Amino acid sequence: YPNWKVWGYDLSKVAVELMKKDPRFDNSRATGEVWDISKEDTSPPVLNVADVCTLLFCLSAIAPEKMAIAANNTVATLKPAGILVFRDYGRYDEAQIKLGTNRAKRLGDNFYVKSDGTRCYYFSLQDIKEIFVEKAGLEILELKYVQRIYQNRATDEKRRR
């Protein structure tokens, strides 16, 4: 896709610096910047420019009360008829069940802190509809859980994700 222009954003300055150091990063076609999508008082660095925007395992780290702000900021980067590709943690994931056994890890309903300090919200399909349809004004093209069983070959342990 030689004509594509790519904008990459992350909350972490370190992550953006690592991305820019990667030998595949091409300054003539890509931009990398720090942007906190959960802030209400800042406008997106780019408006109405993206045909496709990906939000992958990002929204789950944001406090639930700021998710609508993050969604609206992200949607503002899309051109009219642009597409948002969203993937994140689903409700009742095995990791959520394990986190749920430790009250100290629970920050709120379906919202936890992992052992590495990152926060994680586990979404229901209804949560996604509320955030992206009711609050951000998008139309859903496809909405479903992606269910996988991962097996550790060395231990034969199976994990449902």
Image: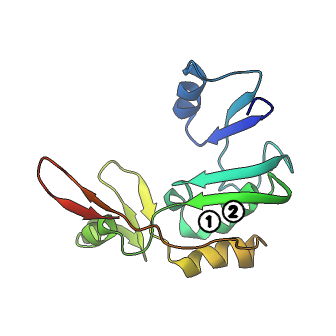
Asked if the residues shown at circle 2 and circle 1 are in contact, with their CB atoms under 8 angstroms apart, the answer is: yes
**Residue 22's spot in the image, x, y percent?**
55, 22
Q: Residue at x 64, y 71 (%)?
A: 142
- Looking at numbered disc 1 in the image, what kind of residue is underneath it? Met
**Residue most extreme to the bottom:** 126
Per the image, the residue denoted by label 1 is 67
Q: Based on the displayed image, in which of its 4 quarters is residue 85 positioned?
A: bottom right
Three-letter amino acid code at the position of disc 2: Ala
Left or right side of 43 for 105 = left
Residue 84 place in picture, x, y as percent? 70, 59
Q: Quadrant of the C terminus?
A: bottom left
In terms of depth relative to the viewer, which is nearer, 125 or 63? 125
Closest to the observer: 73 or 29? Answer: 29
Q: Is residue 33 in sight in this rendering? A: yes
- Compared with 151, 106 (above or below) is below
In this rendering, the answer to whether 160 lies above or below 153 is below
Image quarter of residue 83: bottom right
| Residue found at the very far front of the displayed protein | 1
| Position of residue 25 measured from the top left corner of the image (x, y, whole percent) | 63, 23
Which image quarter holds the N terminus?
top right
Q: Is residue 40 visible?
A: no
Query: Residue at image x 72%, y 29%?
Result: 30
Q: How far, Cα to Cα, is label 2 from label 1?
A: 6 Å
Provide the secondary structure element on which disc 2 rests: helix
Is 72 positioned to the left or the right of 145 in the image? right
Q: Check residue 131 in the rendering and tell me which mark sits there, or answer none.
A: none
| Mark 1: secondary structure | helix
Q: Residues within 10 Å of mark 1 (few under 14, many from 20)?
A: many
Q: Which residue is mark 2?
A: 71
